[in-house]
Amino acid sequence: MSKQSVSVEGLADLEKMMVEHLPKSTGRGVLRRVGTAALKIFVDRARDLAPRASGDLAESLAVSTRLDPGQRRDHRRLVSDDKAAVELFGGAAALPHAHLVEFGTVERHLASGGSTGTMPAQPFMRPAWDATRDAVLDDIADGLGREIAATVARRAKRLAKKRAQGGGR
């Protein structure tokens, strides 16, 4: 698996706006909503490209904030724990064979002398990411600006209403 670097202009300005105008928990909600919507573009494309032997693999593809226990253990080794961060994952929901479909297998020999054969790679996740990466990143950048502005406006309206009723700060 190769690492990719991406760059999106303007995110520092959006982060500054969020920090100045929104509580941390509200900001995380904004990031989660925008990220989920953007990653759906990628997951929908992966679902279209997934092989359809039984349909289980394609139907299991989703956007989530959680990993299964084995994935969590591996993920903890790769990233630092930042309480202000929002992580979203797009992929197969805990199917034990999803990675085998994506990358294929080599011939496996059994102790009894037999062989389980090979399974050729049928990539669907990487081609989906390659096809949608720019759209996902653009959607995040555009969506964040809109969602932050809308959330700040809703919050200001709510606070003004509270003040008018004689409560709140």
Image (tube, rainbow, N blue to C red):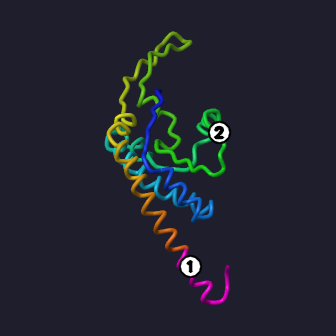
Does 163 lie within the magenta span? yes
Q: Mark 1 belongs to which amino acid?
A: Arg
Secondary structure under badge 2?
A: loop
Residue, disc 1: 158
How many numbered tags mark residues here? Answer: 2
| Residue nearest the viewer, comparing 89 with 13 | 13
Does dot 1 land on a helix, a strand or a loop? helix
On residue 120, the disc is none
Q: Position of residue 11 (x, y in %)?
A: 47, 50
**Residue ID at (62%, 85%):** 163
Q: What crowding class fits label 1: few (fewer than 14 Cα within 10 Å), some (14-19), or many (20 or more)?
A: few
Q: Is residue 35 left or right of residue 48?
A: right
- The answer to whether residue 149 is left or right of residue 138 is right
- What span is in magenta? 156-169
What is the x, y in percent for residue 147? 46, 63
Task: Give neighbour class at mark 2: few <14, some 14-19, many 20+ (Cα, 10 Å).
Answer: few
Name the residue furthest top: 113
Q: Amino acid at mark 2?
A: Ser
Q: Nearer the viewer, residue 157 or 49?
A: 157
The residue nearer to you, when weighing 29 against 156, is 156
Relative vertical location of residue 14 with respect to residue 132 in this rendering, above or below: below
| Residue annotated with mark 2 | 80
In the depicted structure, whether residue 144 falls above or below residue 76: below
Q: Position of residue 78 (x, y in %)?
A: 61, 33
- The kind of secondary structure the magenta stretch mainly shows is helix
Q: CA distance from mark 2 to mark 1?
A: 35 Å
Q: Is residue 147 above or below residue 72?
A: below
Position of the C terminus by quadrant = bottom right
Q: Is residue 139 magenta?
A: no
First reached walking from the N terminus: tag 2 or tag 1: 2
